[in-house]
Every structure is written in structure tokens, then in C-alpha cells.
Image (cartoon, rainbow, N blue to C red):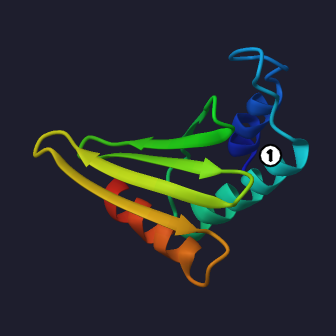
Amino acid sequence: MNNALAIKVDSLAELVDGWFDDAIEPYPVAALDWLLAFLDHLVQGFALPLPYLYPTPGGRVRAGWMTSRWDVLADIDLTTHSVDVVAWKAETRELRERKLALGAPGAEAQLGRFVAVHTR
């Protein structure tokens, strides 16, 4: 397990009830455990740099990889285990998108390859 990644995920566990507004609850521990295992497997399996992690008011977590060529953002739904990922190349205004159900066969590999192609 990558300690730096664990620290990033643990920081999401520190969010308290109402961290954004009164209707927003903290992330469930089991959801963050799943996220850590998923991201650790993805990062190690595809030799990816560690993502930045951001909480979203909708209960998702945004993972971001920024490079000199592409910005890659993955909105990860901790309830449905799905992801909407986009890669944006500002220089050419090119946008590439994928929507994946992470439980589907090959979905994690598709996501890993997508991120790897746009972060190398």
C-alpha cells in the first residue's frame, strides 16, 4: 500500500458533517477503504503518478493528474463504483472522455490505460 496515497485518502475521512453545506455528510469509512484499494491498485498496476484528490459536494471524489500536456480528471462515484473521466489538452482544446462502471470486465484496465496515455 502506498503511504502517500493512504494519507491523501485519509484526509477525506477528516471532513466533518456539513463540510460543504448542511446537507453534506462525511464519506463512509467503507467507501474510503474501497477508494484507497482501488486507487492503489490502479496507480501501481499502471505505474501512474499519484493523483490529487478532491472532495465533491455530490459525494464523489475527484482524482486529478496534471501534466504539461494534459489535465486528467476522474470523478469517482463511491456508491456505484463508476467513474467519469476526461482528459483536456488546453493547447489544442482537445477533450477526450470515458464513462466506466468499474465492476464491468476490463473497466479498470480501460481507465488505467486512459490515464497512462494522457500522463506520460
Label 1 crowd (10 A; few <14 / some 14-19 / many >=20): some
Toward the bottom, the furthest residue is 105
Q: Which residue is located at x 14 percent, y 44 percent?
A: 93
Provide the secondary structure element on which disc 1 rests. helix
Does residue 120 appear in the picture of this structure? Answer: no
The spot of residue 35 in percent (x, y) is 73, 52
- The residue at which mark 1 appears reads as 32
Q: Nearer the viewer, residue 80 or 50?
A: 80
Q: Quadrant of residue 44?
A: bottom right
Q: Position of residue 18 (x, y in %)?
A: 79, 17
Task: Point out the image quarter for the N terminus.
Answer: bottom right
For the question of whether residue 108 can be seen, the reply is yes
Work out which residue is located at the far left of the displayed protein and give it: 92
Measuring 37% from the left and 52% from the top, which residue is drawn there? 86
Name the spot of residue 59 as percent of width and height, x first.
69, 38
Left or right of 109, for residue 15: right
- Looking at the picture, does residue 8 appear above or below residue 85? above
- Residue shown at 43%/70% (left/top)? 113
Front-most of residues 104 and 118: 104
Quadrant of the image containing the C terminus: bottom left
Residue 58: image location, x then y, percent: 64, 35
Farthest residue toward the front? Answer: 23
Q: Residue at x 54, y 47 (%)?
A: 75
Please state which amino acid type lies under the numbered disc 1. Leu
Name the side, left or right, on which 39 lies relative to 94: right
Relative horizontal placement of residue 32, taking residue 50 as reference (left or right): right
Choose top left, top right, bottom left or bottom right for residue 105.
Answer: bottom right
Q: How many marks?
A: 1
Front-most of residues 113 and 106: 106
